Image: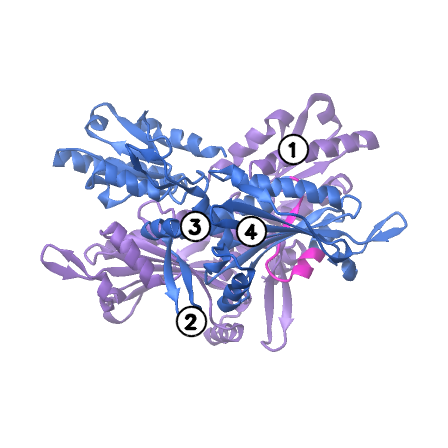
Chain colours: A blue, B purple
């Protein structure tokens, strides 16, 4: 884990500093990491708010009022209410909590200053709640697996049965250094306490069961980094890289320019800038560094692979002659020829699907 | 303005409550409004972080460290650093500030509890900073106009010249009840104070000028609501509606089902549910209410138009026979025939472009 964090530190994802008061390393997020986090939150939004199967309302203020509003608008079960909550525990409380649990490496240990909880509550009729809960577990595990470079890593913890029929199950990721809790799913009947959740079916009155999911953004962020870390062997040497899912990658594309002549070099730089603008105009996050015409190709690729950039566009002397660029893949290191005029459409297709 | 706020209150965008301590109406955001806000922030992200012309880094932690990181990675000007900051002024301070300014209706008066400032700083060489500043003003005004139902509303304030060459210009929206400040653009040379912003060009040392944009999420949110409010006359009566740009609309589509027979009704409901799932799977935010098979068409359309939903899919007896649905537009109230199997692709095309 320390090796991964050091790589991430070098590539602008985060910074690790020792906090003497907490006797603990503290992580702060850097710009590349901030983009990763924004993408993660976006995918959570897509799966939880624009939920395929159920209508979910986003709360911004008072949770109970939103439930009331959702109830009036929907009037039938199930419906959901989602919320983004700031973790109110102080950093010290969170560190103590992890230390008690006795894990040596734990995502929650590397406390981020601003930790948020992404929470979704579903209100479900008690008759179907067990079935709903099982379906929901499967869906959530699928979601984690979908974005993973190593889907076998994700599994369930044992079910913990609490008082009054409360059930709890965690989705965990297995690492060499131990298991990490990513998401907590619970089934409970808190709804009975609340007057405004009374439903009627014929002559009987009932209260919905509540099925909820709880994700810490810190765990989600660190898991995305650790999960994607790989060390394939290339030319006898390990080639550490971050194998992000293309929807999560902070940058989708980067540029590399090679030429011997200074005049073609500046022409190619203009071309790269033109392509970069076109791509960004299509909301494709593209990294364009001034170093892309100066460093050796291998050095650049190392940098881009470690930033988890899925594709690299190579412009060389031939590009000016026949308009063909090379698109290098991070994962295969193979290059394919794409014409300059096709590249925007082609990239759109590459990144469209999950 | 009160008329608009009342409409928004009825449609789940917000809630207005009188705060006795502040002697002022306070607004809290409701679920539909929360979706609108998420879309607004998304568009800001697309235009400011995935910036067409310049590389912008997203700050999460320490602004100076991010600038340092951006500087090391880019090494040439211009580059940008963006930030999402919580407005630290208390609600009382903010209300007092507006009262001093003497405006009767002001977006900043209806204080939201969680107000954020979306801030972007560009670091530009002093030689080109004036040109950059003018370009930037144009770009930002274009951005506001792009999403507006009434683009002529947006204009610049006068330029205010401050000490040491500081310039400030606001982008304002003109309403019947007065002008509203939406975004503040400034050009200044704060950079000179900071050691780590020293740049070298040949033998001369210089410090970059800083061009920054500052948007309050409260003003952005309320402006989106007020800007989109329209009252076209239909059949002799005013038909109030929210004319959102399709990228901003909280929900893109809704359903209406009409049939005389109970058996076809349930079949059509299943079909609507199937279409709804397909659309949501494509990340199209779709509203599916149980009332869509019960209320009269006119009542539903009134509700959906006032929620700013651009299109309504109508399923009727014919749909089961020949598979043709009607797609009603909020803006024209015209209906076009679309086959059930084409609707997902067609909707994708409708919402793709700006």
Please, is residue A65 above or below residue B254 in the view?
Answer: below
Evaluate whether label 3 is on the same chain as label 1.
yes
| Mark 3 belongs to chain | B
State the separation of the CA atoms marked 2 and 3. Answer: 36 Å
Q: Which element is circle 3 on?
A: helix
Q: Which element is circle 4 on?
A: strand
State the separation of the CA atoms marked 3 and 1. Answer: 30 Å
Is residue A133 within the magenta segment?
Answer: no
Q: Count neighbours of disc 1 (C-alpha within 10 A) and say few if under 14, some if 14 to 19, many if 20 or more.
A: some
Query: Do tag 2 and tag 1 residues touch (Cβ < 8 Å)?
Result: no
State the separation of the CA atoms marked 4 and 2. Answer: 26 Å
Query: Where does label 2 land, which residue?
Result: A21
Residue pictured at 82% horizontal, 30% vertical? B263
Q: Nearer the viewer, mark 2 or mark 1?
A: 2
State the separation of the CA atoms marked 2 and 1. Answer: 56 Å
Residue pictured at 46% horizontal, 54% vertical? B153
Q: Which element is circle 1 on?
A: helix
Evaluate whether label 4 is on the same chain as label 1.
no
Residue A181: give its label.
Answer: 4
Q: Position of residue A304 (x, y in %)?
A: 32, 41
Q: Which of marks 1 and 3 precedes in the sequence?
A: 3
The magenta-colored residue range is A53-68
Query: Where does label 1 land, which residue?
Result: B275
Asked which quadrant contains residue A47, the reply is top right
Q: Position of residue B258 (x, y in %)?
A: 76, 34
Is residue A57 within the magenta segment?
Answer: yes
State the separation of the CA atoms marked 4 and 3. Answer: 30 Å
Comparing A108 with B210, the one in front is A108
Q: Which element is circle 2 on?
A: loop
């Amino acid at each position: 884990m320390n090796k991964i964090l050091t790589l991430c530190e070098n590539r602008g994802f985060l910074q690790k500093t020792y906090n003497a008061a907490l006797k603990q390393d503290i992580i702060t997020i850097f710009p590349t990491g901030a983009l990763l986090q924004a993408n993660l939150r976006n995918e959570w939004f897509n799966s939880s708010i624009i939920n395929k199967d159920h209508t979910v309302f986003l709360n911004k203020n008072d949770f109970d009022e939103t439930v009331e509003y959702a109830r009036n608008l929907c009037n039938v079960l199930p419906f959901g209410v989602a919320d983004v909550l700031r973790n109110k525990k102080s950093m010290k409380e969170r560190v103590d909590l992890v230390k008690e649990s006795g894990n040596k490496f734990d995502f929650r240990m590397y406390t981020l200053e601003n930790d948020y909880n992404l929470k979704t509550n579903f209100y479900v009729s008690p008759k179907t709640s067990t079935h709903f809960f099982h379906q929901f577990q499967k869906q959530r595990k699928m979601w984690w697996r979908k974005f993973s470079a190593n889907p076998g890593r994700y599994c369930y913890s044992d079910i913990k049965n609490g008082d009054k029929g409360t059930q709890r199950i965690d989705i965990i990721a297995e690492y060499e250094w131990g298991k990490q809790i990513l998401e907590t799913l619970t089934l409970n009947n808190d709804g009975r306490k609340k007057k405004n959740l009374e439903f009627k079916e014929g002559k009987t009155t009932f209260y919905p069961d509540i099925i909820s999911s709880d994700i810490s953004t810190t765990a989600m962020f660190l898991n995305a980094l650790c999960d994607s870390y790989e060390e394939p062997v290339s030319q006898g040497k390990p080639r550490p890289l971050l194998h992000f899912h293309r929807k999560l990658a902070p940058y989708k594309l980067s540029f590399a320019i090679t030429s011997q002549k200074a005049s073609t070099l500046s022409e190619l730089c203009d071309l790269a800038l033109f392509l970069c603008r076109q791509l960004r105009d299509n909301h494709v996050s593209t990294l364009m560094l001034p170093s892309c015409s100066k460093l050796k190709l291998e050095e650049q690729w190392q940098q881009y692979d470690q930033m988890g950039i899925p594709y690299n566009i190579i412009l060389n002397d031939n590009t000016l002659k026949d308009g063909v660029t090379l698109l290098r893949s991070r994962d295969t290191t193979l290059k394919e020829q794409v014409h300059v005029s096709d590249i925007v459409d082609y990239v759109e297709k590459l990144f469209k699907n999950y």
